[in-house]
Image: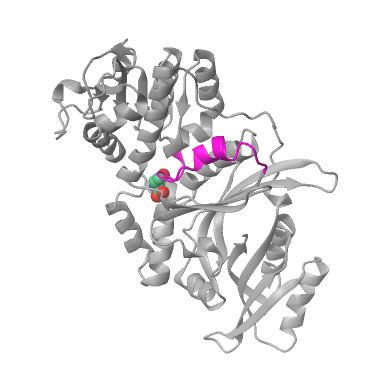
Amino acid sequence: MTATTAPSSNGKVFDKSVGVAVLGMGTVGTEVLRLIAENPNAYANRIGGRIELKGVAVSDLSKPRPGVDPALLTDDAEALINRDDVDIVVEVIGGIEYPRKLILQALQAGKSVVTANKALVAAHASELGEAADKAGVDLYFEAAVAAAIPVVGMLRRSLAGDQIQRISGIVNGTTNFILDAMATTGATYEDALAEATRLGYAEADPTADVEGHDAASKAAILASLGFHTRVTFDDVHCEGITNITAEDIAAASEAGYTIKLLAICEKLVDENGNKSVNARVHPTLVPNEHPLATVDKSYNAIFVEAEAAGRLMFYGNGAGGAPTASAVLGDVIGAARNKVHGGRAPGENPYANHPIADFGEVTTRYHIDMNVVDRLGVLSLIADHFAKAGISLRTVRQEEAEDETVARLIVVTHEALEKDLRAIVTELEGTEDVLEVRSVIRLDV
Ligand code: HSE
């Protein structure tokens, strides 16, 4: 922190300034720099001191960077971090190993860090949190989950007095955009993905979006904060949307459901009162009357169920440069305020340390779409398989298939253990009567 006497637009003179270094100038970094440049007085008044941009680290110095003073650009991120006049380091590079090294260096050097990097936080929250604690500085990552939606702050602060039971979220804008476009405009998967990429929602490698990895990182962060238990990316069961077909979407719609890729974080309590937590990402049939079903385009929403607060929903822009930069700047201002006035933001606190429950132990419901041999008694034979497994059926719908020897059977089960439902699908696949299991989608809200 350095001394300054420059007055703000309302005449107030701030005698302190906070030095900020920005690492990365992609979609998000560019918007972070725009907000810093456009709002100096508002930020100074909110902080009680001025933000001074000390440098911007980029990988390619030869690339034109309109709107940024060339004197601020450097390709030496480490030197920038270690400058004495840098108090806060903003990491918007992406990736894991390189930013991890830089963030650890920054924390060890006593700089507070703001990162938008969900993959890094989901994999290394404990190492980063410990480094921040040791140095007595802040580690903020609001933008890592659902960009502009203030869900990290909500879990860290607003709901700190409550007991969270379940968090169900649409936390990936790209996949929500794709599923919504397929359902409402009849767009192909490929066209919808290309459009999401063009609009800047998708990751550099959109595999992370469509395979559910991006949502799994966010689920790990939400579960860690919500249940005060360290949950990492590797703990999250993850299925993406690449197997969802136009036929699945049509069948869901006919039955009154919308298919969403949900990140679900749940606290389980067994018959002896023992608690465990599970986090998972998979396509889910959401009843059309549920608030999550109405979340369209690239929007995100987080549905929280807490003991005292009841049901809460947070909705908004979960991807894109400006919405992500909004969350980053919120964190920068929080960190800057702490630099000026003292104090630290609440960090993760995994004191509860619940065991991670295997996905097989989770209760869910299955929507199974299969082709069966169209002959007398086949329906009761299939029902018999479920009955023997102790799984009760909620609805059974039979439709004609193109081939008159084949019937399409759509079965929705009542609640059962994931491992039992999985076993029955394997069993059905092995019978002569079931020609093909076309799709299995869970009902899990
Ligand atoms: N690719 C992500 C999404 C961006 O589509 O939501 C925000 O993490």
Q: In which quarter of the view is residue 432 placed?
A: bottom right
Residue at the front extreme, as displayed = 11
Left or right, 331 with respect to 164, comes to: left
Mark yes or no: residue 249 visible.
yes
Mark yes or no: residue 233 visible.
no
Image color mode? one colour
Query: Which residue is located at x 49 percent, y 32 percent?
Result: 121
Query: Which residue is located at x 71 percent, y 61 percent?
Result: 421
- Pick the residue in front: 135 or 400: 135
- Pick the residue in front: 425 or 51: 51
Residue 152 falls within the magenta-colored stretch: yes
- Pick the residue in front: 442 or 10: 10
**Residue 424 x/y as whole percent:** 72, 64
**Residue 113 x/y as whole percent:** 41, 24
Which quadrant: the N terminus?
Answer: top left
Residue 269 falls within the magenta-colored stretch: no
Image height of 173 relative to 28, above or below = below
**Residue 154 x/y as whole percent:** 53, 41
Left or right, 151 with respect to 274, comes to: left
Which segment did they paint magenta? 144-163
